[in-house]
């Protein structure tokens, strides 16, 4: 029996890959709080002068959000277009049917848009499951949940508000 390849939990990085501070977000594309957090987290990274990077991990709350898992699979199956798909999925949280996901894939430039739905997308299931399992291991219970990896937090969950000023203060970032 062959072992499944190890999943890189740092495969979706927004920002400078070697930034000294990593914010890991456990999120769900159907979660309205994740949708609200997305632009805040991007602004945090964009305004950090390369000191912060964002890592996305899937944590679909499939018992509450019926399209969360298929949206996670679609994002994963979008490959190099992941961050563009991430943005589009949050922009259209109320429309995550297979037809919608395929249209979004075409919009962001996925070569074969049908690859993000159905059996084709199921090939990405192990990635979503690995992200989810890592969240369960950390004690993630809802979304968005942030885990800060730096010399101060060292992988602990961030329990503050997902608000730019609060995050900057927690991370020791100041704006002039």
Image: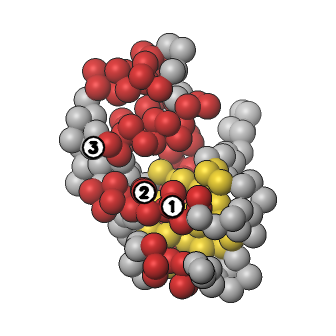
Which coloring applies here? secondary structure
- Nearer the observer, disc 3 or disc 1? 1
Quarter location, residue 148: bottom right
Q: How many marks?
A: 3
Q: From the viewer's perspective, is 19 left or right of 67?
A: right
* Residue 164 in view, yes or no: yes
Q: Earlier in the sequence, mark 3 or mark 1?
A: 1
Mark 3 lies on residue: 93
SS at circle 1: helix
Q: Residues under labels 3 and 1: Cα distance?
A: 20 Å
Q: Nearer the viewer, residue 107 or 149?
A: 107
Mark 1 lies on residue: 43
Q: From the viewer's perspective, is 126 left or right of 68?
A: right
Residue 50 point in image, percent of width and height: 71, 62
Q: Residue at x 42, y 57 (%)?
A: 39
Q: Residue at x 54, y 14 (%)?
A: 111
Q: Nearer the viewer, residue 114 or 2?
A: 114
Quarter location, residue 92: top left
165 up-or-down from 118: above or below? below
SS at circle 3: loop
Mark 2 lies on residue: 39
The C terminus: image quadrant: bottom right
Quarter location, residue 20: bottom right
Q: Residue at x 73, y 33 (%)?
A: 2
Crowding at label 2, few (<14), some or many (≥20) Cα neighbours within 10 Å? some
SS at circle 2: helix
154 up-or-down from 26: above or below? below
Mark 2–mark 1 CB contact (< 8 Å): yes
- Nearer the observer, disc 3 or disc 2? 2
Q: Residues under labels 3 and 2: Cα distance?
A: 14 Å
* Residue that lies at the very extreme toward the right in this rendered image: 18
Q: Residue at x 38, y 26 (%)?
A: 104
């Amino acid at each position: 029996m062959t072992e499944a390849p190890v999943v890189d939990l740092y495969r979706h990085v927004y920002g400078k890959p070697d930034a000294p501070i990593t914010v890991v977000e456990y999120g769900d594309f159907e979660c309205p709080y994740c949708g609200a957090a997305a632009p805040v987290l991007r602004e945090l990274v964009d305004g950090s002068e390369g000191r912060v990077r964002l890592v996305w991990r899937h944590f679909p709350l499939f018992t509450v959000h019926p399209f969360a898992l298929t949206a996670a699979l679609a994002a994963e199956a979008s490959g190099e277009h992941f961050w563009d798909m991430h943005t589009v999925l949050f922009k259209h949280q109320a429309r995550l049917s297979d037809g919608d996901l395929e249209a979004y894939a075409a919009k962001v430039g996925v070569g074969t848009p049908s690859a993000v739905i159905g059996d084709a997308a199921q090939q990405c299931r192990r990635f979503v499951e690995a992200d989810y399992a890592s969240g369960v291991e950390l004690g993630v219970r809802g979304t968005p949940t942030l885990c800060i990896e730096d010399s101060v937090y060292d992988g602990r969950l961030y329990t503050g508000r997902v608000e730019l000023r609060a995050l900057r203060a927690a991370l020791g970032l100041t704006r002039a």
